[in-house]
Amino acid sequence: MHTSQKLNQFKKKTGKTSPANAKKSKINDENTQNPENEIKHTAENTFQNLNGNSATDIIQTRDSPDSIENRKDSEDLKTTASTESLHQLSRQLNGLLAESSALIGADDLDTSSVEELERRNQDLAALLEKHSQANEQLNLQIQQIRDHSKNLQGQLERERENFLTKQKQELGPLKEQLQVHIQTIGILVAEKTETQSQLNQSQKLAETRFNEIEELSGRLKASRQRVADLERSLSTTSSSSQQFQKSSKDYAKDVDRLKLDLYKANKSNEELQQQTSELSGKLQAKVTECTGLEQSIDELKNKLEMAELYSKQVSSHQDGGQESLKIVETLKQEKEELLTKIHEYTEAFQRVSTEKDQLSEQYQQYMDQLQGHNKKLTEQITSLTEDRENLLTSQHDLESSVLELQRRLEDVDSNNTSANNDLILQKDNEMHQLREKHEDFIQKYEGQMRDNVQLSRLLEEKEDKITQLEDRMSEVNREDGDKAHLLESIQSNKTALSRALTQNKELKHQLAELQNGFVKMSNENMELMTRIQSEQHSSKELFCKLTQQEDELRVMRDALSVKQSKLTDLELSTHEAKKEMYQQEQLHDRLRHYEAQAQLVESLGRELHNSQDMVEALKTQNSELRTMLIKATSHKENGHTDSEEEKKRDDVIDSLSSAIQQLEIERNQLVESLKEQRELSDSLSIKVSDLQEEVVQKSAFQSEDNNVVSRVEYEQLKQAMELIQNKYMKVMRDKAELSDKSDELEHTVLQLQGESETIGKIQGDSETIGEYISLYHHQRAILQQRELQKNDYISHLAKDREEMSLKLGELQTLMMQLLGEKNMLHNYHEESSITSPDVSIQPHLSQEPMVNGTDWPDYTSSEEDSDSEVETIVGGQEGTTDTLGEETPQDHTNHNHHHHNHDHHNHEHHHHMTKDQRPDKSKTSENTEGTATKIMNLLSEISHNNYTDRTVDHNFLPCKYCKGRFIMYEGTNIVDFNQ
């Protein structure tokens, strides 16, 4: 409830005192008085909005994006250095103003609090824009990765389709060859049937010729016909064997071609594997580079933090306990960050391993498909070889049948010769008269028998030759089959060996990668363990040093109290009088110096007003140019062009370029004058800090001097401080106005340059105006989305802040309880009573956390807050420093806020403990351990925040006077510089 009331007060105050609302209220008052002014004002606002948004959308097209980015970097470096110095000066001076505002009244408190809250809101808005830009960039990267994955899937599907089409194309000719072989087999079967029919006919002829025994000439003719038939069958068998050889050669060629295809496919697979391995190696190298860079960054951050902590420990001995707790908190945060990084690395390693497994499974599936295809081809080859062997067996069967038929013919001839001899013996008894004739016939018969024997010998020799030739053919066929089997076995062995070698290489490479990864992980774990042990040891040493320093401080305080009692009041009074005189002289000199500088600031303000008038004139010229361009585009659409209008355009563009050059010269002069003023303001801030130290020392001496201050001295000091504050506030306000005006001038100059250079390219295009309007509407929608995101983010930040304030209050109570348990609370109160000055002189110290009028963190109260959110946002540092910069001022303010709330309670608790008996050491140690564990749990809860863990893209620096992204318009192409 308390924080919500404060937020409502803040909204009311910002609504009343913010410059934007003040301007709006003035404009509304003027508009109510004059309706004509209201119409003019609305028209001017709409036109200025169009100019601003168009200037941010359209940038120079002549220069390259790299040169534009380099100019932006150089200009941002100048502005960041100036803004950082201004913020530091404003913080130091606001500390003085806060001290003086407690003396003067509550009005100045409200104004300073409102200004600081407005700065806080600006910083939060910048952070919101950075978060939203980072989210948009991440969404774009995710979309690119998805598109890439879709392209890869499409490529895989195309390769599969190509492979299937190749398979179909290769199977087509094989099927055609099989059909041709089937046709040849049918032809051979038809020839076999024909030969069988011829054999039947020859048998019938043999039966008819058994009756013609007497006609030997007819028998010889029949034998010659049989020999001719046998020769024909031999020629047919030889031709069929030649055909079989040709078909076997064709099959061998097909097998070789298929083997070459397999070899090419294996080569392509090996190349793909090599590409995947190279890509994985590149990924691993990049991951190692990123890890190395992150480790170096973390080491540098740790060194910086340790150096800052060590400097703070050496400079401030009073806040030893609090700094030790901060060191413990930082160490725990670093430990948690290291653990999160380890988890991220393990997850990345698991992802890589799963991707490797998926690739190996895909490769195995592809190899299984190829093996199945090879098996199908081998089965087809085996079926063809079986058909060939069947044809050869059928040929041998035919030859054996021919031999059996020849044997049968010889048996028939032998039977016919025995029957003829019997008939001749019977006729010899009956025919005595024809003996002489018979002897002649016998002689002839014997000659013919000799001829027949010779013919039979010749036939036997031919049959032997035929059997030898058949044996040779069978041997040759066997040798061919053995050779084919040997070649196939050799090639299969070669492929198996090549596969085994590649698999062994892959396994060795994978083993080496696994070993390297395991070694890296083990080394990283060892390094982390050593770092943790060293940090624990250093924390223990720091705790011991802190205890020793506390003891030394106690001894020194006792000695100081003894020495202060010995000093005389006369020496103090004389010393103080001399110092007061010297300080008054210095104050008068510095006031004169401030008056001289105020005159310089006024002159610079006049120059800035003149430059603003020039800028307004250029804006009016720009509006006229736009109207002329619109008219020109309309004339071009109608087809009417005039040379006089083109000359006018050229004259206007020349005048614009000259005006822009003059503005650049004036801008450079203003930048140089601002540099000089910043140097003067730095020297002034140093002098003011010296004055502040002197005033604090004087107040400390006065508090030690029994808190006695004269009324005249107090009034003189008050008047001098009021004069200094008024002069310094005037100078700083003028300086801030000058810096804002210079930024506005730079922004308008950039707009005018971009618009003047894009005029020439827009003249020839009529379609670009519509695209320009669509871009404008698109950016308006994006800005509305960003405003909604900003409101959500602010509400979440308010909730987180309330939770943080509650947790810090609990931590304050636990710390005071721990001090009470360690019997250190009395010493703490003694230190606070010694170091704190008199309440009557400096009442602002007791009201330090409420300087702003609200519960918001104070960025101007101390010098330790130099690394605040403003500097981190302007400087573009990393997200870790932003979160630290946000947490440290909150801790500081909440600590101050709760310190005074719990002071009285802890004092009463300590007084009660001194009255009562103290518990035993064992109970106190248990209590201290319990409170320590509670404190550590609270610190761990505070470190885990919802909105501080967000990563912000700090490389992008937003502009105060423009909204949306930088967009360069090149013809019909749009280039986004924030990506």
Image: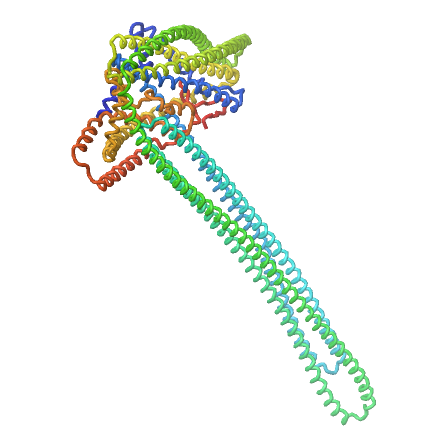
Q: For residue 498, say whether it is visible.
A: yes
> In terms of depth relative to the viewer, which is nearer, 728 or 221?
728
Measured as percent of width and height from the top left, residue 590 is found at 38, 9
Q: Toward which corner of the image does residue 532 lie, by quadrant?
A: top left
Q: x, y (%) of residue 460?
A: 73, 77
**Looking at the rendering, which quadrant does residue 617 occupy?**
top left
Tell me if 243 is positioned left or right of 624 in this view: right
What is the count of numbered marks?
0
Up-down relation of residue 599 to residue 556 (above or below)? above
Residue 14 visible in the current orientation: no
The reply, left or right, for residue 753 in relation to residue 692 is right
| Location of residue 100 with respect to 420 vertically, above or below | above
Hey, which quadrant is residue 789 in on the image?
A: top left
Q: Residue 133, percent across and down?
A: 40, 28
Question: Front-most of 323 and 470?
Answer: 323
Measured along the vertical axis of the image, is residue 447 above or below residue 722?
below
Seen from the viewer's position, the closer of residues 310 and 395 is: 310
